Image (cartoon, helix red, strand yellow):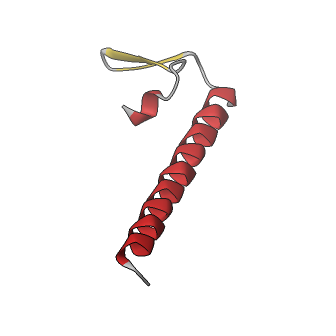
Amino acid sequence: MTIKTRKCLIAFGLLMVCGLYGAAAARVELARQGAPVAQVSCKQDLCVPHTGWLSSMR
């Protein structure tokens, strides 16, 4: 196996892992938005809205 082939395989593998992670994160976010939860949850003095897109990834 040449170095060029090995580099291509590693790059392809990394892209696949990143793609799978991104797809899973998007599905989790869509499932979280579709769940019946209150629009705002207030605990102590801090209110957190639950309507932001991909807010859990920040």
Q: Position of residue 26 (x, y in %)?
A: 58, 38
Residue 32 vertical position relative to residue 16 in the rendered view, above or below: above
Query: Left or right: 5 with respect to 33?
Result: left
Residue 36 vertical position relative to residue 20 in the rendered view, above or below: above
Residue 30 figure quarter = top right
Q: Position of residue 12 (x, y in %)?
A: 50, 61
Q: Name the residue located 45 percent from the left edge and 73 percent from the top edge.
A: 5
Q: Quadrant of the C terminus?
A: top left
Residue 45 figure quarter = top left
Q: Name the residue located 42 percent from the left edge and 67 percent from the top edge.
A: 10
Q: Is residue 18 visible?
A: yes
Q: Name the residue located 38 percent from the left edge and 68 percent from the top edge.
A: 7
Task: Find the residue positioned furthest to the bottom.
Answer: 1
Residue 58 vertical position relative to residue 9 in the rendered view, above or below: above
Query: Left or right: 23 with respect to 14?
Result: right
Q: Name the residue located 62 percent from the left edge and 25 percent from the top edge.
A: 37
Q: Position of residue 29 (x, y in %)?
A: 58, 34
